[in-house]
Amino acid sequence: MKKIFSLLIFTITVMGSGSVMADDGHCNYTQENMFAGPFKVCQMPADAAACEDLGNTDDNADAVAGDGECSTEGAVGTCDMGDTKLVYYEGDPGGLEIGCGFQSGEWVNAE
């Protein structure tokens, strides 16, 4: 029982630190659903499998996985949801901020 508890604490610590997820890369795709879009976005972290899933969700398209973090060049802003960040390259910042709030995120305008 002690070994299980130690493993659980280690897993929570590593996952909570973000260090494991930071190397998972990013996913550029066109986001579209019944509420919004299409928008060019980038989500991080996202490995190749997660990127494929993102590209097949709702009416999303053109998903391409990449290494490292999303580019902020040309970004409108970022929806920071804690472990996940969604960088928007298109759209009205005011409307995107509202949508970000529905995702329990914090909107950060691009500088």
Image: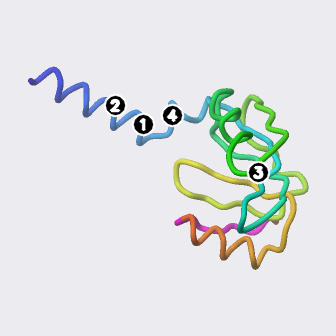
Residue 2's disc is none
Residue 77, image x and y in percent?
A: 77, 63
Q: Amino acid at mark 3?
A: Asp
Residue 97, image x and y in percent?
A: 69, 73
Q: Quadrant of the N terminus?
A: top left
Q: Residues within 10 Å of mark 4 (few under 14, many from 20)?
A: few
The Cα atoms of the two marked residues, 3 and 2, are separated by 34 Å
Query: Is residue 75 rendered magenta in the image?
Result: no
63, 66: nearer the viewer:
63
Q: Residue visible at 71% across and 68% down?
A: 35
Q: Which residue is mark 4?
A: 19
The Cα atoms of the two marked residues, 3 and 4, are separated by 31 Å
Residue 15's disc is 1
Residue 58, image x and y in percent?
A: 70, 51
For marks 4 and 2 on the same chain, the one whose residue lies earlier in the sequence: 2
Q: Residue visible at 54% across and 34% down?
A: 21
Q: Which residues are magenta?
A: 104-110
User: Which of labels 1 and 3 is toward the front?
Assistant: 3
User: Which of labels 4 and 2 is toward the front?
Assistant: 2
Circle 4 SS class: loop
